[in-house]
Amino acid sequence: MRIHLITATAAVAGMLLLAGCTAPDEIDDPTPTPTAVQGPERPEGFPTLGEPVGDDKADFKSQQEAVAAAEAAMTVFVSHDRDYDAWWAELSPLLTVEAQEAWAYTDPRMITVTQLTGAATIVDAPSSTLVIVDVPTDTGVWRLELVRAAEVGTTGQGAWKAFTLMPPETTE
């Protein structure tokens, strides 16, 4: 019984290996050609890929909330004259999960920026859930991308959180 199982497994593995080794029909054109996937008819009123979905811009109040969130995140970020646990406990709730993963192992003593030197300004507000803000500091202008998502189990939209914090050398 064990020999049959090994033989069957080897045969399946061999077929999968050979299936992955087939050459493409045409090698002359290195650029892939997008193909449309056929599916059910799209109901009337639903946008197709690439069409704008309407006026999905952050309103003035929302943009001001994003600016305040960017300033709050950077204010905590630059106040690194304390131990890691206190610094991280205050900073992490202001970041998205992705930003938390990126900054979690940062030694705050290694951060060279020490203060904000002016008011944050909006660079772009492409949608109601994404705002890009520049924050001037003593080491240059930091760019923050803030996102806003609806919190699970609540109505309305959640708080603005910093998705990326880019130091001056990456934005110039």
Image (cartoon, helix red, strand yellow):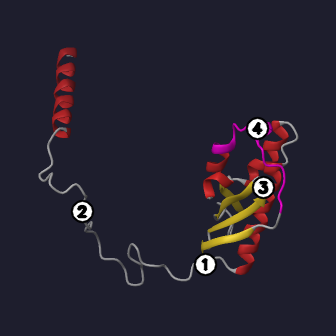
Give whichever of discs 3 and 2 has the lower sequence position. 2
* Magenta region: 101-117
Which numbered disc, 1 or 2, marks the residue closer to the eye? 2
Q: Of helix, strand and loop, which one carries label 4? A: helix
Quarter-of-image position of residue 73: bottom right
**Residue 107 among those drawn in magenta:** yes
Which numbered disc, 1 or 4, marks the residue closer to the eye? 4
The amino acid marked with disc number 1 is Lys
Which numbered disc, 1 or 3, marks the residue closer to the eye? 3
Say if residue 34 shows up in the picture: yes
The amino acid marked with disc number 3 is Met
Residue beneath the point at 42% across and 79% down? 46
> Residue 143 location, x and y as percent?
67, 60
Q: Main secondary structure of the magenta part?
A: loop
Give whichever of discs 1 and 2 has the lower sequence position. 2
Read off the residue under disc 4: 110
Q: CA distance from mark 4 to mark 2?
A: 47 Å
Q: Which mark is residue 33?
A: 2
Say if residue 166 shows up in the picture: no
> Residue 111 location, x and y as percent?
76, 42
> Residue 123 location, x and y as percent?
65, 70
Read off the residue under disc 1: 57
> Residue 94 location, x and y as percent?
75, 54
Read off the residue under disc 3: 74
The amino acid marked with disc number 4 is Met
Q: Of helix, strand and loop, which one carries label 3? A: helix
Q: CA distance from mark 1 to mark 4?
A: 37 Å
134, above or below 139, in the image: below
The amino acid marked with disc number 2 is Thr
Q: CA distance from mark 3 to mark 2?
A: 44 Å
Residue beneath the point at 14% across and 44% down? 23
For mark 3, does the 10 Å Cα neighbourhood hold few (<14), some (14 to 19), or many (20 or more) residues? many
